[in-house]
Image (tube, rainbow, N blue to C red):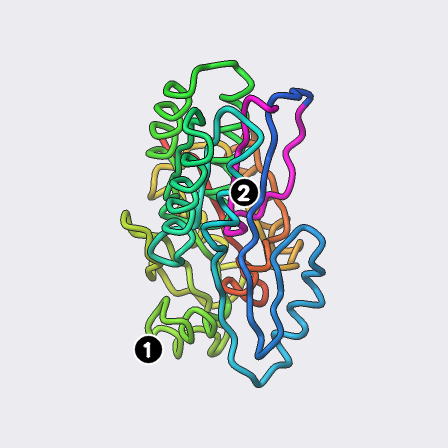
Amino acid sequence: MKKWKIVVDSGSSIREIETTNQNVALEVVPLMINIGNEVFVDSADLDIANFLSELKDTKQKTSSACPSPEVYANRFEGAENFICFTISSQLSGSYNSASLGKDIALERNPDANIHIFDSRSAGSEMDLLAKKAFELAETEADFDTVVKELNAYHENLDIAFLLESVDNLVNNGRVSKILGQMIGLLGIRLIGNRTPEGTIQLAHKSKGQKRALKTLINELKSKGYNGGEIEASHVLNPDIAKAFEEEILKEYPNAKITTRVTSALCSYYAEHNGMIVGFETN
């Protein structure tokens, strides 16, 4: 039996975390994306390029769906301590499902320690939280200390989005139709952030990639970024991630930046050429 399991839903883009500690494991709970009658399970072996191609070509209704409580309950087995991060409860039912799964798991094993974090976010901010949880678990700290440290760390994280399209966010009621009509016209990009409650809001509009990147970096700085760790996930657009990294390193040469491809769920909402940036603040 493991001592720790770090559980994330696929609102996070992390699929593995390197560790030599045999007492700590990562579990990813996939959400589902429906394209017409076809269901795509957001697991590590899903071909993101193929998924995006089908999404682009479809004329059918699309939607996302969260895991069942039983799926979560099954993930809360095989360890003593469980730390779980879900996508914002304002964007998905995954947090509620995980909470019900916790109740089921504790009925089966009352001695387990389980804490569910509503990330109030998605994507790269969740990635930073998962990595921090691993780091703390590897120190052999007790459960309550790990939860306390993660709560404190969470208060010093934020997220920003650079989006060329918000069609799926509009169609699923995550942003307004008026906002959706502004994005994508004449090269307009949306730089968005999250509210404290965990909803997506418009921060800035910018025309062209170069200006959008500058605006994005200014958004990070306005939220307190000062050279800390960054997680940047992109929708199969490594060029924009590289350009972003280069601009950050010009100003903060010691910044630690990790780039990765978005999960299917984040690809679904960030859409073509989108990027999600999670970052540490002061």
* x, y percent for residue 38: 62, 74
* x, y percent for residue 75: 54, 40
| Quarter of the image where the C terminus is located | top left
Q: Which residues are magenta?
A: 1-19
Mark 2 lies on a secondary structure that is helix
Residue 128 appears in view? yes
| Quarter of the image where the N terminus is located | top right
Furthest residue in direction bottom, as rendered: 59
Q: Which residue is mark 2?
A: 74
Q: Is residue 85 left or right of residue 177?
A: right
Q: Is residue 29 left or right of residue 182?
A: right
Q: Which residue is painted at 62% across and 60% down in the image?
A: 41
Which sits earlier in the primary sequence, circle 1 or circle 2?
2
* x, y percent for residue 271: 54, 66
- In space, the residues marked 1 and 2 are separated at their CA atoms by 42 Å
Residue 230 appears in view? no
